[in-house]
Image (cartoon, rainbow, N blue to C red):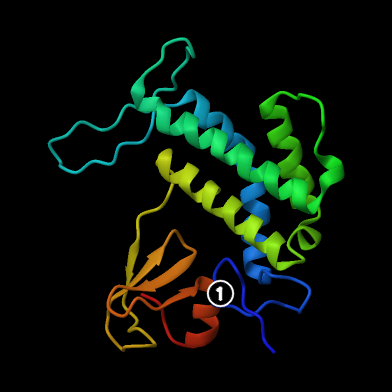
Amino acid sequence: MEWYCIICTAAPTSSDDTSICLECQRRLRGALTRFPRLYVQLYVELPFVPRSSPLQQPPNRTPWKSREKGTPLRLPLLDHAQRCTDVLRAWATYAMPDIVPEETVRPGHLFQELCHALAADLPMAVKSTEGGRHAHRTWMAYTIARRLLGQTEPARPMATPCLNCDMRALLLIDNYMVICRSCRAHWSIQTWHAATSPRHIG
């Protein structure tokens, strides 16, 4: 029986004792490496506001230097920072309970330590289905943090027709996922390259 990755849902896992494909493990390890910096940015920056009109001024990306100066605009970022901590701690408590301290630790330091420990032994952390679910929640928290900070790349149209419906309606999302706007089929970029080689992506 072939098992499919919990995160991208398209690629088979490398073996029965892991819940995430090798490509998603690679991306997740990179995300865990960058996550502590994003966590800090959630506390010190104003939220990203996408421009809906060329007449609008570009968003203010100046870091918010004073934490005493509360503003409703920052609440989604602060709420999500707490969500990131909760998700990461839940995963570490499940997969590596010995690394989660019982005593109170500075949240930023704890966040960094958990990210480092999970990235260092990721195959063990995603060995079971439940570990994979925790990893998926962490991946989603990471991508939402990037979106809140305006760090995601815009979707890029692709010239190649969809493998499923043959319509030219494909989008490359954040250099990670290929999605068809017509039939809603989707592939990880690794699976797409494997399926379309030697076809050409526009």
Q: In x, y percent, where is residue 127?
A: 77, 66
Residue at 62% in and 73% down:
5
Look at the image and tell me in which quarter the N terminus lies: bottom right
Residue occupying image coordinates x 41% and y 15% = 70
Residue at 32% across, 84% down: 161
Of residue 39 and residue 106, the one placed in the foreground of this image is 106
Badge 1 density bin: few <14, some 14–19, many ≥20, Cα 10 Å: some
One can see residue 197 in this view: no
Task: Residue 90 in the image: state x and y as whole percent.
Answer: 69, 46
Compared with residue 143, is residue 110 higher up or lower down, i.e. above or below?
A: above
Closer-to-camera residue (202/176): 176
As rendered, which of 18 and 104 lies closer to the eye? 104
The relative height of residue 196 versus residue 84 in the rendered view (above or below) is below
User: Is residue 130 something that shows in the picture?
Assistant: yes
Residue 59 screen position, x and y as percent: 29, 31
| Image side of residue 52 versus residue 176, left or right | left
Image position of 168 (left or right of 54): right
Residue 32 picture location, percent across and down? 66, 47
Disc 1 residue type (three-letter) = Gln
Asked if residue 62 lies left or right of residue 104, the reply is: left
Question: Quadrant of residue 149 in the image?
Answer: top left
